[in-house]
């Protein structure tokens, strides 16, 4: 799980405006360099592939003249920084090349598979936050009791479980033995093509169209992978919530609230929890980025037609354009999510203004 | 009686704070850490499992009473029995023996990645923190770029480019693990950067390398060791994930992630093929987490 520093020391009030402008400029530069670095990495990875990119295009039957021509056309004779500039302009124009498997532009493939992953990751985050945050709060309030120990074990197990294995076991138990869930996919085959695609989030589309049977079918399919991913993020969120809450409960204003006779519940939720909301937001953003990791494996296990399945099948066929496109997209999403949480952080927390 | 007598003398010698030598002082602090590890049952359980893993990996040929590579289709997919404790796989290989040899693969990857990552992360982080200025900015930008990728995805991209194989998996994982170490080393270095003993060393004319090595390393070591121990758990999970996708150790080598993956085809007929290696991954990964957690409590009581 990647951790990016977001908290900064509070700026003095007087020179607020120019400082804020400076901060905006700085963070803009930071994002640009990060994006540039991201593309440098994917570009380098693309160059590291032992396979000859020219052969990949023309096949190994072509003669030397064709080879030389294509070599020139692909710009491989030009210096490396020119090639990188070419790559940059391709990426900016959303041109990630063509996929070998689907014979389609990678950008088009990504647009098709991406909503499925976002749908899964979002539901998983809702489950993870919905369970993890209350668990963390309770564990902190009842520090040292059995509740705390249970929360700790649940958290550590979530950190330590290989997610692809858990998915397989869930399929074994809940599909093979109990018949409670489908073995994979996004909806049943016979529900295919009924719903009009508006957002490409099947749960939302089917609800909007009033196709409740399709909605149920989709829910039936998403529940197992979402719960498994949600468990992983619950583990992380509950541990972070616990340590944030412990820090608050040590503060003197809690003692003051106790002294004036406030009950436990308002102290915990109205005082302590209020103060960790902003921190939690950052952590939820990080958990969401971590889930993008988990989706790659869990989508493969549950045959979920999203970015992860696309990436792994591309890996299998050494379809590097598709691999690099997916990796770049995941990197960009991570940056975007972190940026978003940073902005919201500054917006909500007056100390960082 | 005599034996317990010397033991209690040793204990007294270790526990006493009237040191007669630097060695005694050092042993004293190690002994105290050991005692607090014993006092924390969960951390000790983690330590015991890790210790067991090392022993099993070292003695694999002795413990495994079947050859992990011999194929015998006559006994393929047999359920667990007294002969084959964890059954046999689709090639008739003994799953228990492959599990034992898989411990070697896991340990190999974990140790190699840690040995590569610790010095690199430390040098980058400590240099950035100590020198400051534009060196700091550049190094930390690079670190953040690597941090912005989810680690498995980055490792996937690198191993896809390098080609499948255990060495390439090690390189790919190492490339994703060093940034948090560098960040931690930088943060720790910053807290000592302007300490008097560092200034004193500078005034005596010590070079950057010497100050980092002699003065900063020893102080950063505890928190970095804790971090590395916790990291081992995620290294194991990433390695297993790569193995599961066919990018890690290649057959016929025994690797837990790959074993669980190949067992998926026979999930309904032979549940043990997937279940057993998965439990092994879970146990070892949990053990490193427990141990790391315990070490953190010992070395840094603030997080308790």
Image: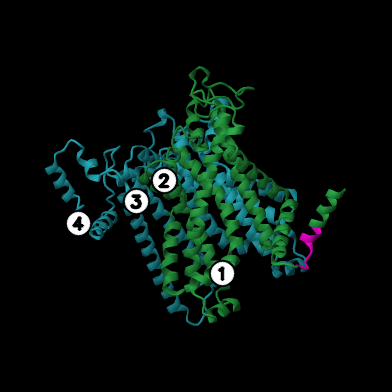
Chain colours: A cyan, B green
* Up-down relation of residue B212 to residue B108 (above or below): below
On the same chain: label 1 and label 2? yes
Left or right of residue A315, residue A171 in this image = right
On the same chain: label 1 and label 4? no
Answer whether labels 1 and 3 touch (C-beta < 8 Å). Answer: no
- Packing grade of label 4 (10 A; few <14, some 14-19, many >=20) is few
Residue A115, quarter of the rendered image? top left
* Up-down relation of residue B230 to residue A171 (above or below): below
Q: Which residue is mark 2?
A: B168
Q: Which residue is mark 3?
A: A45
The alpha-carbon separation of the residues under discs 1 and 4 comes to 47 Å
Closest to the observer: B174 or A257? B174
Q: Which mark is residue B214?
A: 1
Answer whether labels 1 and 2 touch (C-beta < 8 Å). Answer: no
Depth check, mark 2 against mark 4: the one in front is: 2
Q: Earlier in the sequence, mark 4 or mark 3?
A: 3
Q: Secondary structure at mark 4?
A: loop
- Residue B187 shown in magenta: no
Residue B250, quarter of the rendered image? top left
Output the chain of dot 2.
B
Q: Earlier in the sequence, mark 1 or mark 2?
A: 2
Segment colored magenta: B11-19
The residue at 52%/69% (across/down) is B212
Residue A350 seen in render: no
Left or right of residue A345, residue A76 in this image = left
Q: Position of residue A121 (x, y in %)?
A: 48, 46
Closest to the observer: B283 or A30? B283
Q: Residue furthest right?
A: B1
Closest to the observer: A144 or B294? B294
On the same chain: label 1 and label 3? no
Q: Which residue is mark 4?
A: A78
């Amino acid at each position: 799980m990647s951790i990016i520093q977001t908290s900064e020391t509070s700026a003095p009030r007087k020179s607020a405006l120019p400082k804020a402008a400076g901060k905006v400029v700085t963070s803009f530069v930071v994002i640009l360099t990060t994006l540039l670095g991201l593309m440098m990495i994917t570009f380098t990875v693309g160059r590291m592939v032992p396979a000859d990119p020219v052969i990949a295009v023309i096949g190994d039957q072509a003669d030397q003249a064709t080879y030389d021509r294509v070599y020139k056309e692909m710009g491989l004779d030009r210096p490396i920084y020119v090639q990188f500039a070419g790559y940059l302009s391709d990426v900016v124009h959303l041109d990630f090349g063509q996929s070998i498997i689907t014979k389609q532009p990678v950008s088009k493939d990504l647009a098709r598979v991406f909503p499925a992953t976002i749908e899964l990751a979002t539901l998983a985050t809702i489950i993870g936050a919905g369970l993890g945050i209350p668990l963390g709060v309770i564990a902190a309030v009842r520090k040292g009791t059995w509740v705390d120990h249970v929360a700790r074990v649940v958290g550590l197990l979530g950190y330590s479980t290989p997610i692809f294995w858990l998915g397989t076991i869930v399929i074994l138990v809940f599909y093979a033995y109990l018949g409670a869930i489908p073995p994979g996919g996004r909806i049943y085959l016979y529900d295919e093509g009924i719903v009009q695609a508006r957002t490409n989030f099947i749960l939302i589309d089917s609800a909007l169209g009033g196709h409740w049977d399709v909605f149920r079918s989709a829910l039936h399919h998403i529940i197992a992978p979402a719960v498994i991913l949600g468990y992983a993020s619950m583990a992380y969120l509950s541990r972070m919530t616990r340590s944030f809450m412990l820090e608050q409960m040590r503060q003197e204003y809690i003692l003051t609230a106790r002294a004036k006779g406030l009950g436990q519940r308002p102290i915990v939720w109205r005082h302590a929890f209020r103060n960790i909301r902003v921190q939690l937001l950052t952590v939820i953003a990080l958990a969401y980025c971590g889930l993008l990791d988990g989706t790659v494996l869990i989508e493969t296990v549950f045959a979920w037609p999203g970015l992860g399945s696309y990436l792994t099948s591309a890996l299998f066929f050494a379809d590097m354009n598709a691999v690099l496109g997916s990796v770049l997209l995941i990197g960009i999403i991570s940056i975007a999510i972190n940026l978003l949480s940073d902005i919201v952080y500054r917006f909500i927390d007056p100390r960082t203004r | 009686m005599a034996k317990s007598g010397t033991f209690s003398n040793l204990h007294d010698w270790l526990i006493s704070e009237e040191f007669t030598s630097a060695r005694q002082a050092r042993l004293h602090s190690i002994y105290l850490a050991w005692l607090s590890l014993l006092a924390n049952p969960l951390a000790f359980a983690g330590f015991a499992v890790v210790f067991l893993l090392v022993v099993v990996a070292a003695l694999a040929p002795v413990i495994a009473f079947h050859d992990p590579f011999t194929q015998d289709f006559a006994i393929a997919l047999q359920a667990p029995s007294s002969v084959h404790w964890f059954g046999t796989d689709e090639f008739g290989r003994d799953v228990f023996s492959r599990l034992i040899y898989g411990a070697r693969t896991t340990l190999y990857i974990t140790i190699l990645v840690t040995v590569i990552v610790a010095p690199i992360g430390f040098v980058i982080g400590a240099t950035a923190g100590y020198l400051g200025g534009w060196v700091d900015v550049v190094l930390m930008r690079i670190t953040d770029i690597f941090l912005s990728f989810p680690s498995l995805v980055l490792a996937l991209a690198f191993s896809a480019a390098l080609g499948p194989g255990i060495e390439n998996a090690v390189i790919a994982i190492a490339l994703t693990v060093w940034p948090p170490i560098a960040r931690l080393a930088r943060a720790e270095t910053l807290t000592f950067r302007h300490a008097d003993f560092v200034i004193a060393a500078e005034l005596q004319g010590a070079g950057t390398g010497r100050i980092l090595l002699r003065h900063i390393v020893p102080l950063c070591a505890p928190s970095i060791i804790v971090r590395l121990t916790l990291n081992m758990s995620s290294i194991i999970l990433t390695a297993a994930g790569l193995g599961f996708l066919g990018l890690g150790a290649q057959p016929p080598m025994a690797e837990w992630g790959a074993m669980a993956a190949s067992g998926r085809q026979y999930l309904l007929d032979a549940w043990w093929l997937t279940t057993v290696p998965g439990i092994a991954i879970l146990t070892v990964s949990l053990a490193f987490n427990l141990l790391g957690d315990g070490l953190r409590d010992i070395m840094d009581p603030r997080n308790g």
